[in-house]
Image (cartoon, rainbow, N blue to C red):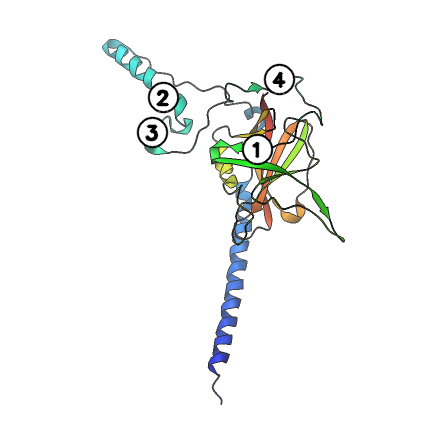
Amino acid sequence: MARPSILGTALISFGALMVLSAAGYAIFAGISRGQSDDFEATLAPDDRQVGFVAPTPVPPDATGDTSAIVKRFASLYPGSQINPRYWSAPAWAGSEPFSGPGLPDDYETTLRPGFGLPPGSTDLPVRMRIPDIGMDEVVEELDLIIGEGTTHYEQPVNIVGHIRGTANPGENGAGWYFGHQSNFGSSEGAVFERLPDIFDLFRNDPVFVYIDTEDASYAYRVIGTGVEDREDLTLVPTDPSTVTLVTSWPPLVFDQRFLVFAELVGIRR
């Protein structure tokens, strides 16, 4: 029997490697998709306004000769500077970011009866900031491209893309924003690289998304996260002012979409 040539042996080995790689990727993709449900969470309606007043550390009842010392020490405790989840632990127990218990002083709350800005009354977004994940990016409009039998939105290349025709910042209705989570093998940027981190953050502390126009800034509080199959994603309208941030998911598979939902809580004119 003739022995296979060196080239034939190499081709057989290469084919086997490709089959193993495809099988491995299929297993990895299946496991990744199976974990997507773990990234879905929603704040209960009663909890969505909780956290806007800093819970002040209360010094223990002091009696006896040590009362003055205890009170002096308690007054120095920087409770407003430490992430509340570590108040009962040493300062070095954790370092998750904490942007504060509420809105910055120069923002006025929109959480009051009768507040609302009608569609068409505000400007287009130009900037998005999410301090808790260190994000500060330019926002530009994305147009719908209609081809032969297909329609799709422009790719948001190194920007956060606002879907044209959805609500502008502050307006009643839903604003939709898209960005890439990874730039693996492409030059489209990764403006939403840390967006999935919000899943862990918002369930413990308020997380704010700030969206700026040319003459105002609007603060949205994150109220939930979710995962949708790419084919099932639809732009759902809302009555109050909300935003939905969308990026590809899971990493290295990208056939689903990770979503962050937030509602308007403040405005700086």
Q: From the image, state whether disc 1 or disc 2 is nearer to you.
A: 1
Give the Cα distance between marks 2 and 4: 31 Å
The amino acid marked with disc number 4 is Arg
- Along the polypeptide, which appears first: circle 2 or circle 3? 2
> Mark 4: few, some, or many residues within 10 Å (few <14, many ≥20)?
few
- Along the polypeptide, which appears first: circle 4 or circle 1? 4
Q: From the image, state whether disc 1 or disc 3 is nearer to you.
A: 1
- Where disc 3 sits, the SS reads helix
Give the Cα distance between marks 3 and 4: 36 Å
- Where disc 4 sits, the SS reads loop
Q: Which mark is residue 91?
A: 3
- Along the polypeptide, which appears first: circle 1 or circle 2? 2
Instruction: List x then y, in percent, for residue 210.
Output: 55, 29
- Along the polypeptide, which appears first: circle 2 or circle 4? 2
Pointer 4 with pointer 1, Cβ within 8 A: no
> Mark 2: few, some, or many residues within 10 Å (few <14, many ≥20)?
few
Q: From the image, state whether disc 4 or disc 1 is nearer to you.
A: 1
Quickly name the residue at label 1: 127
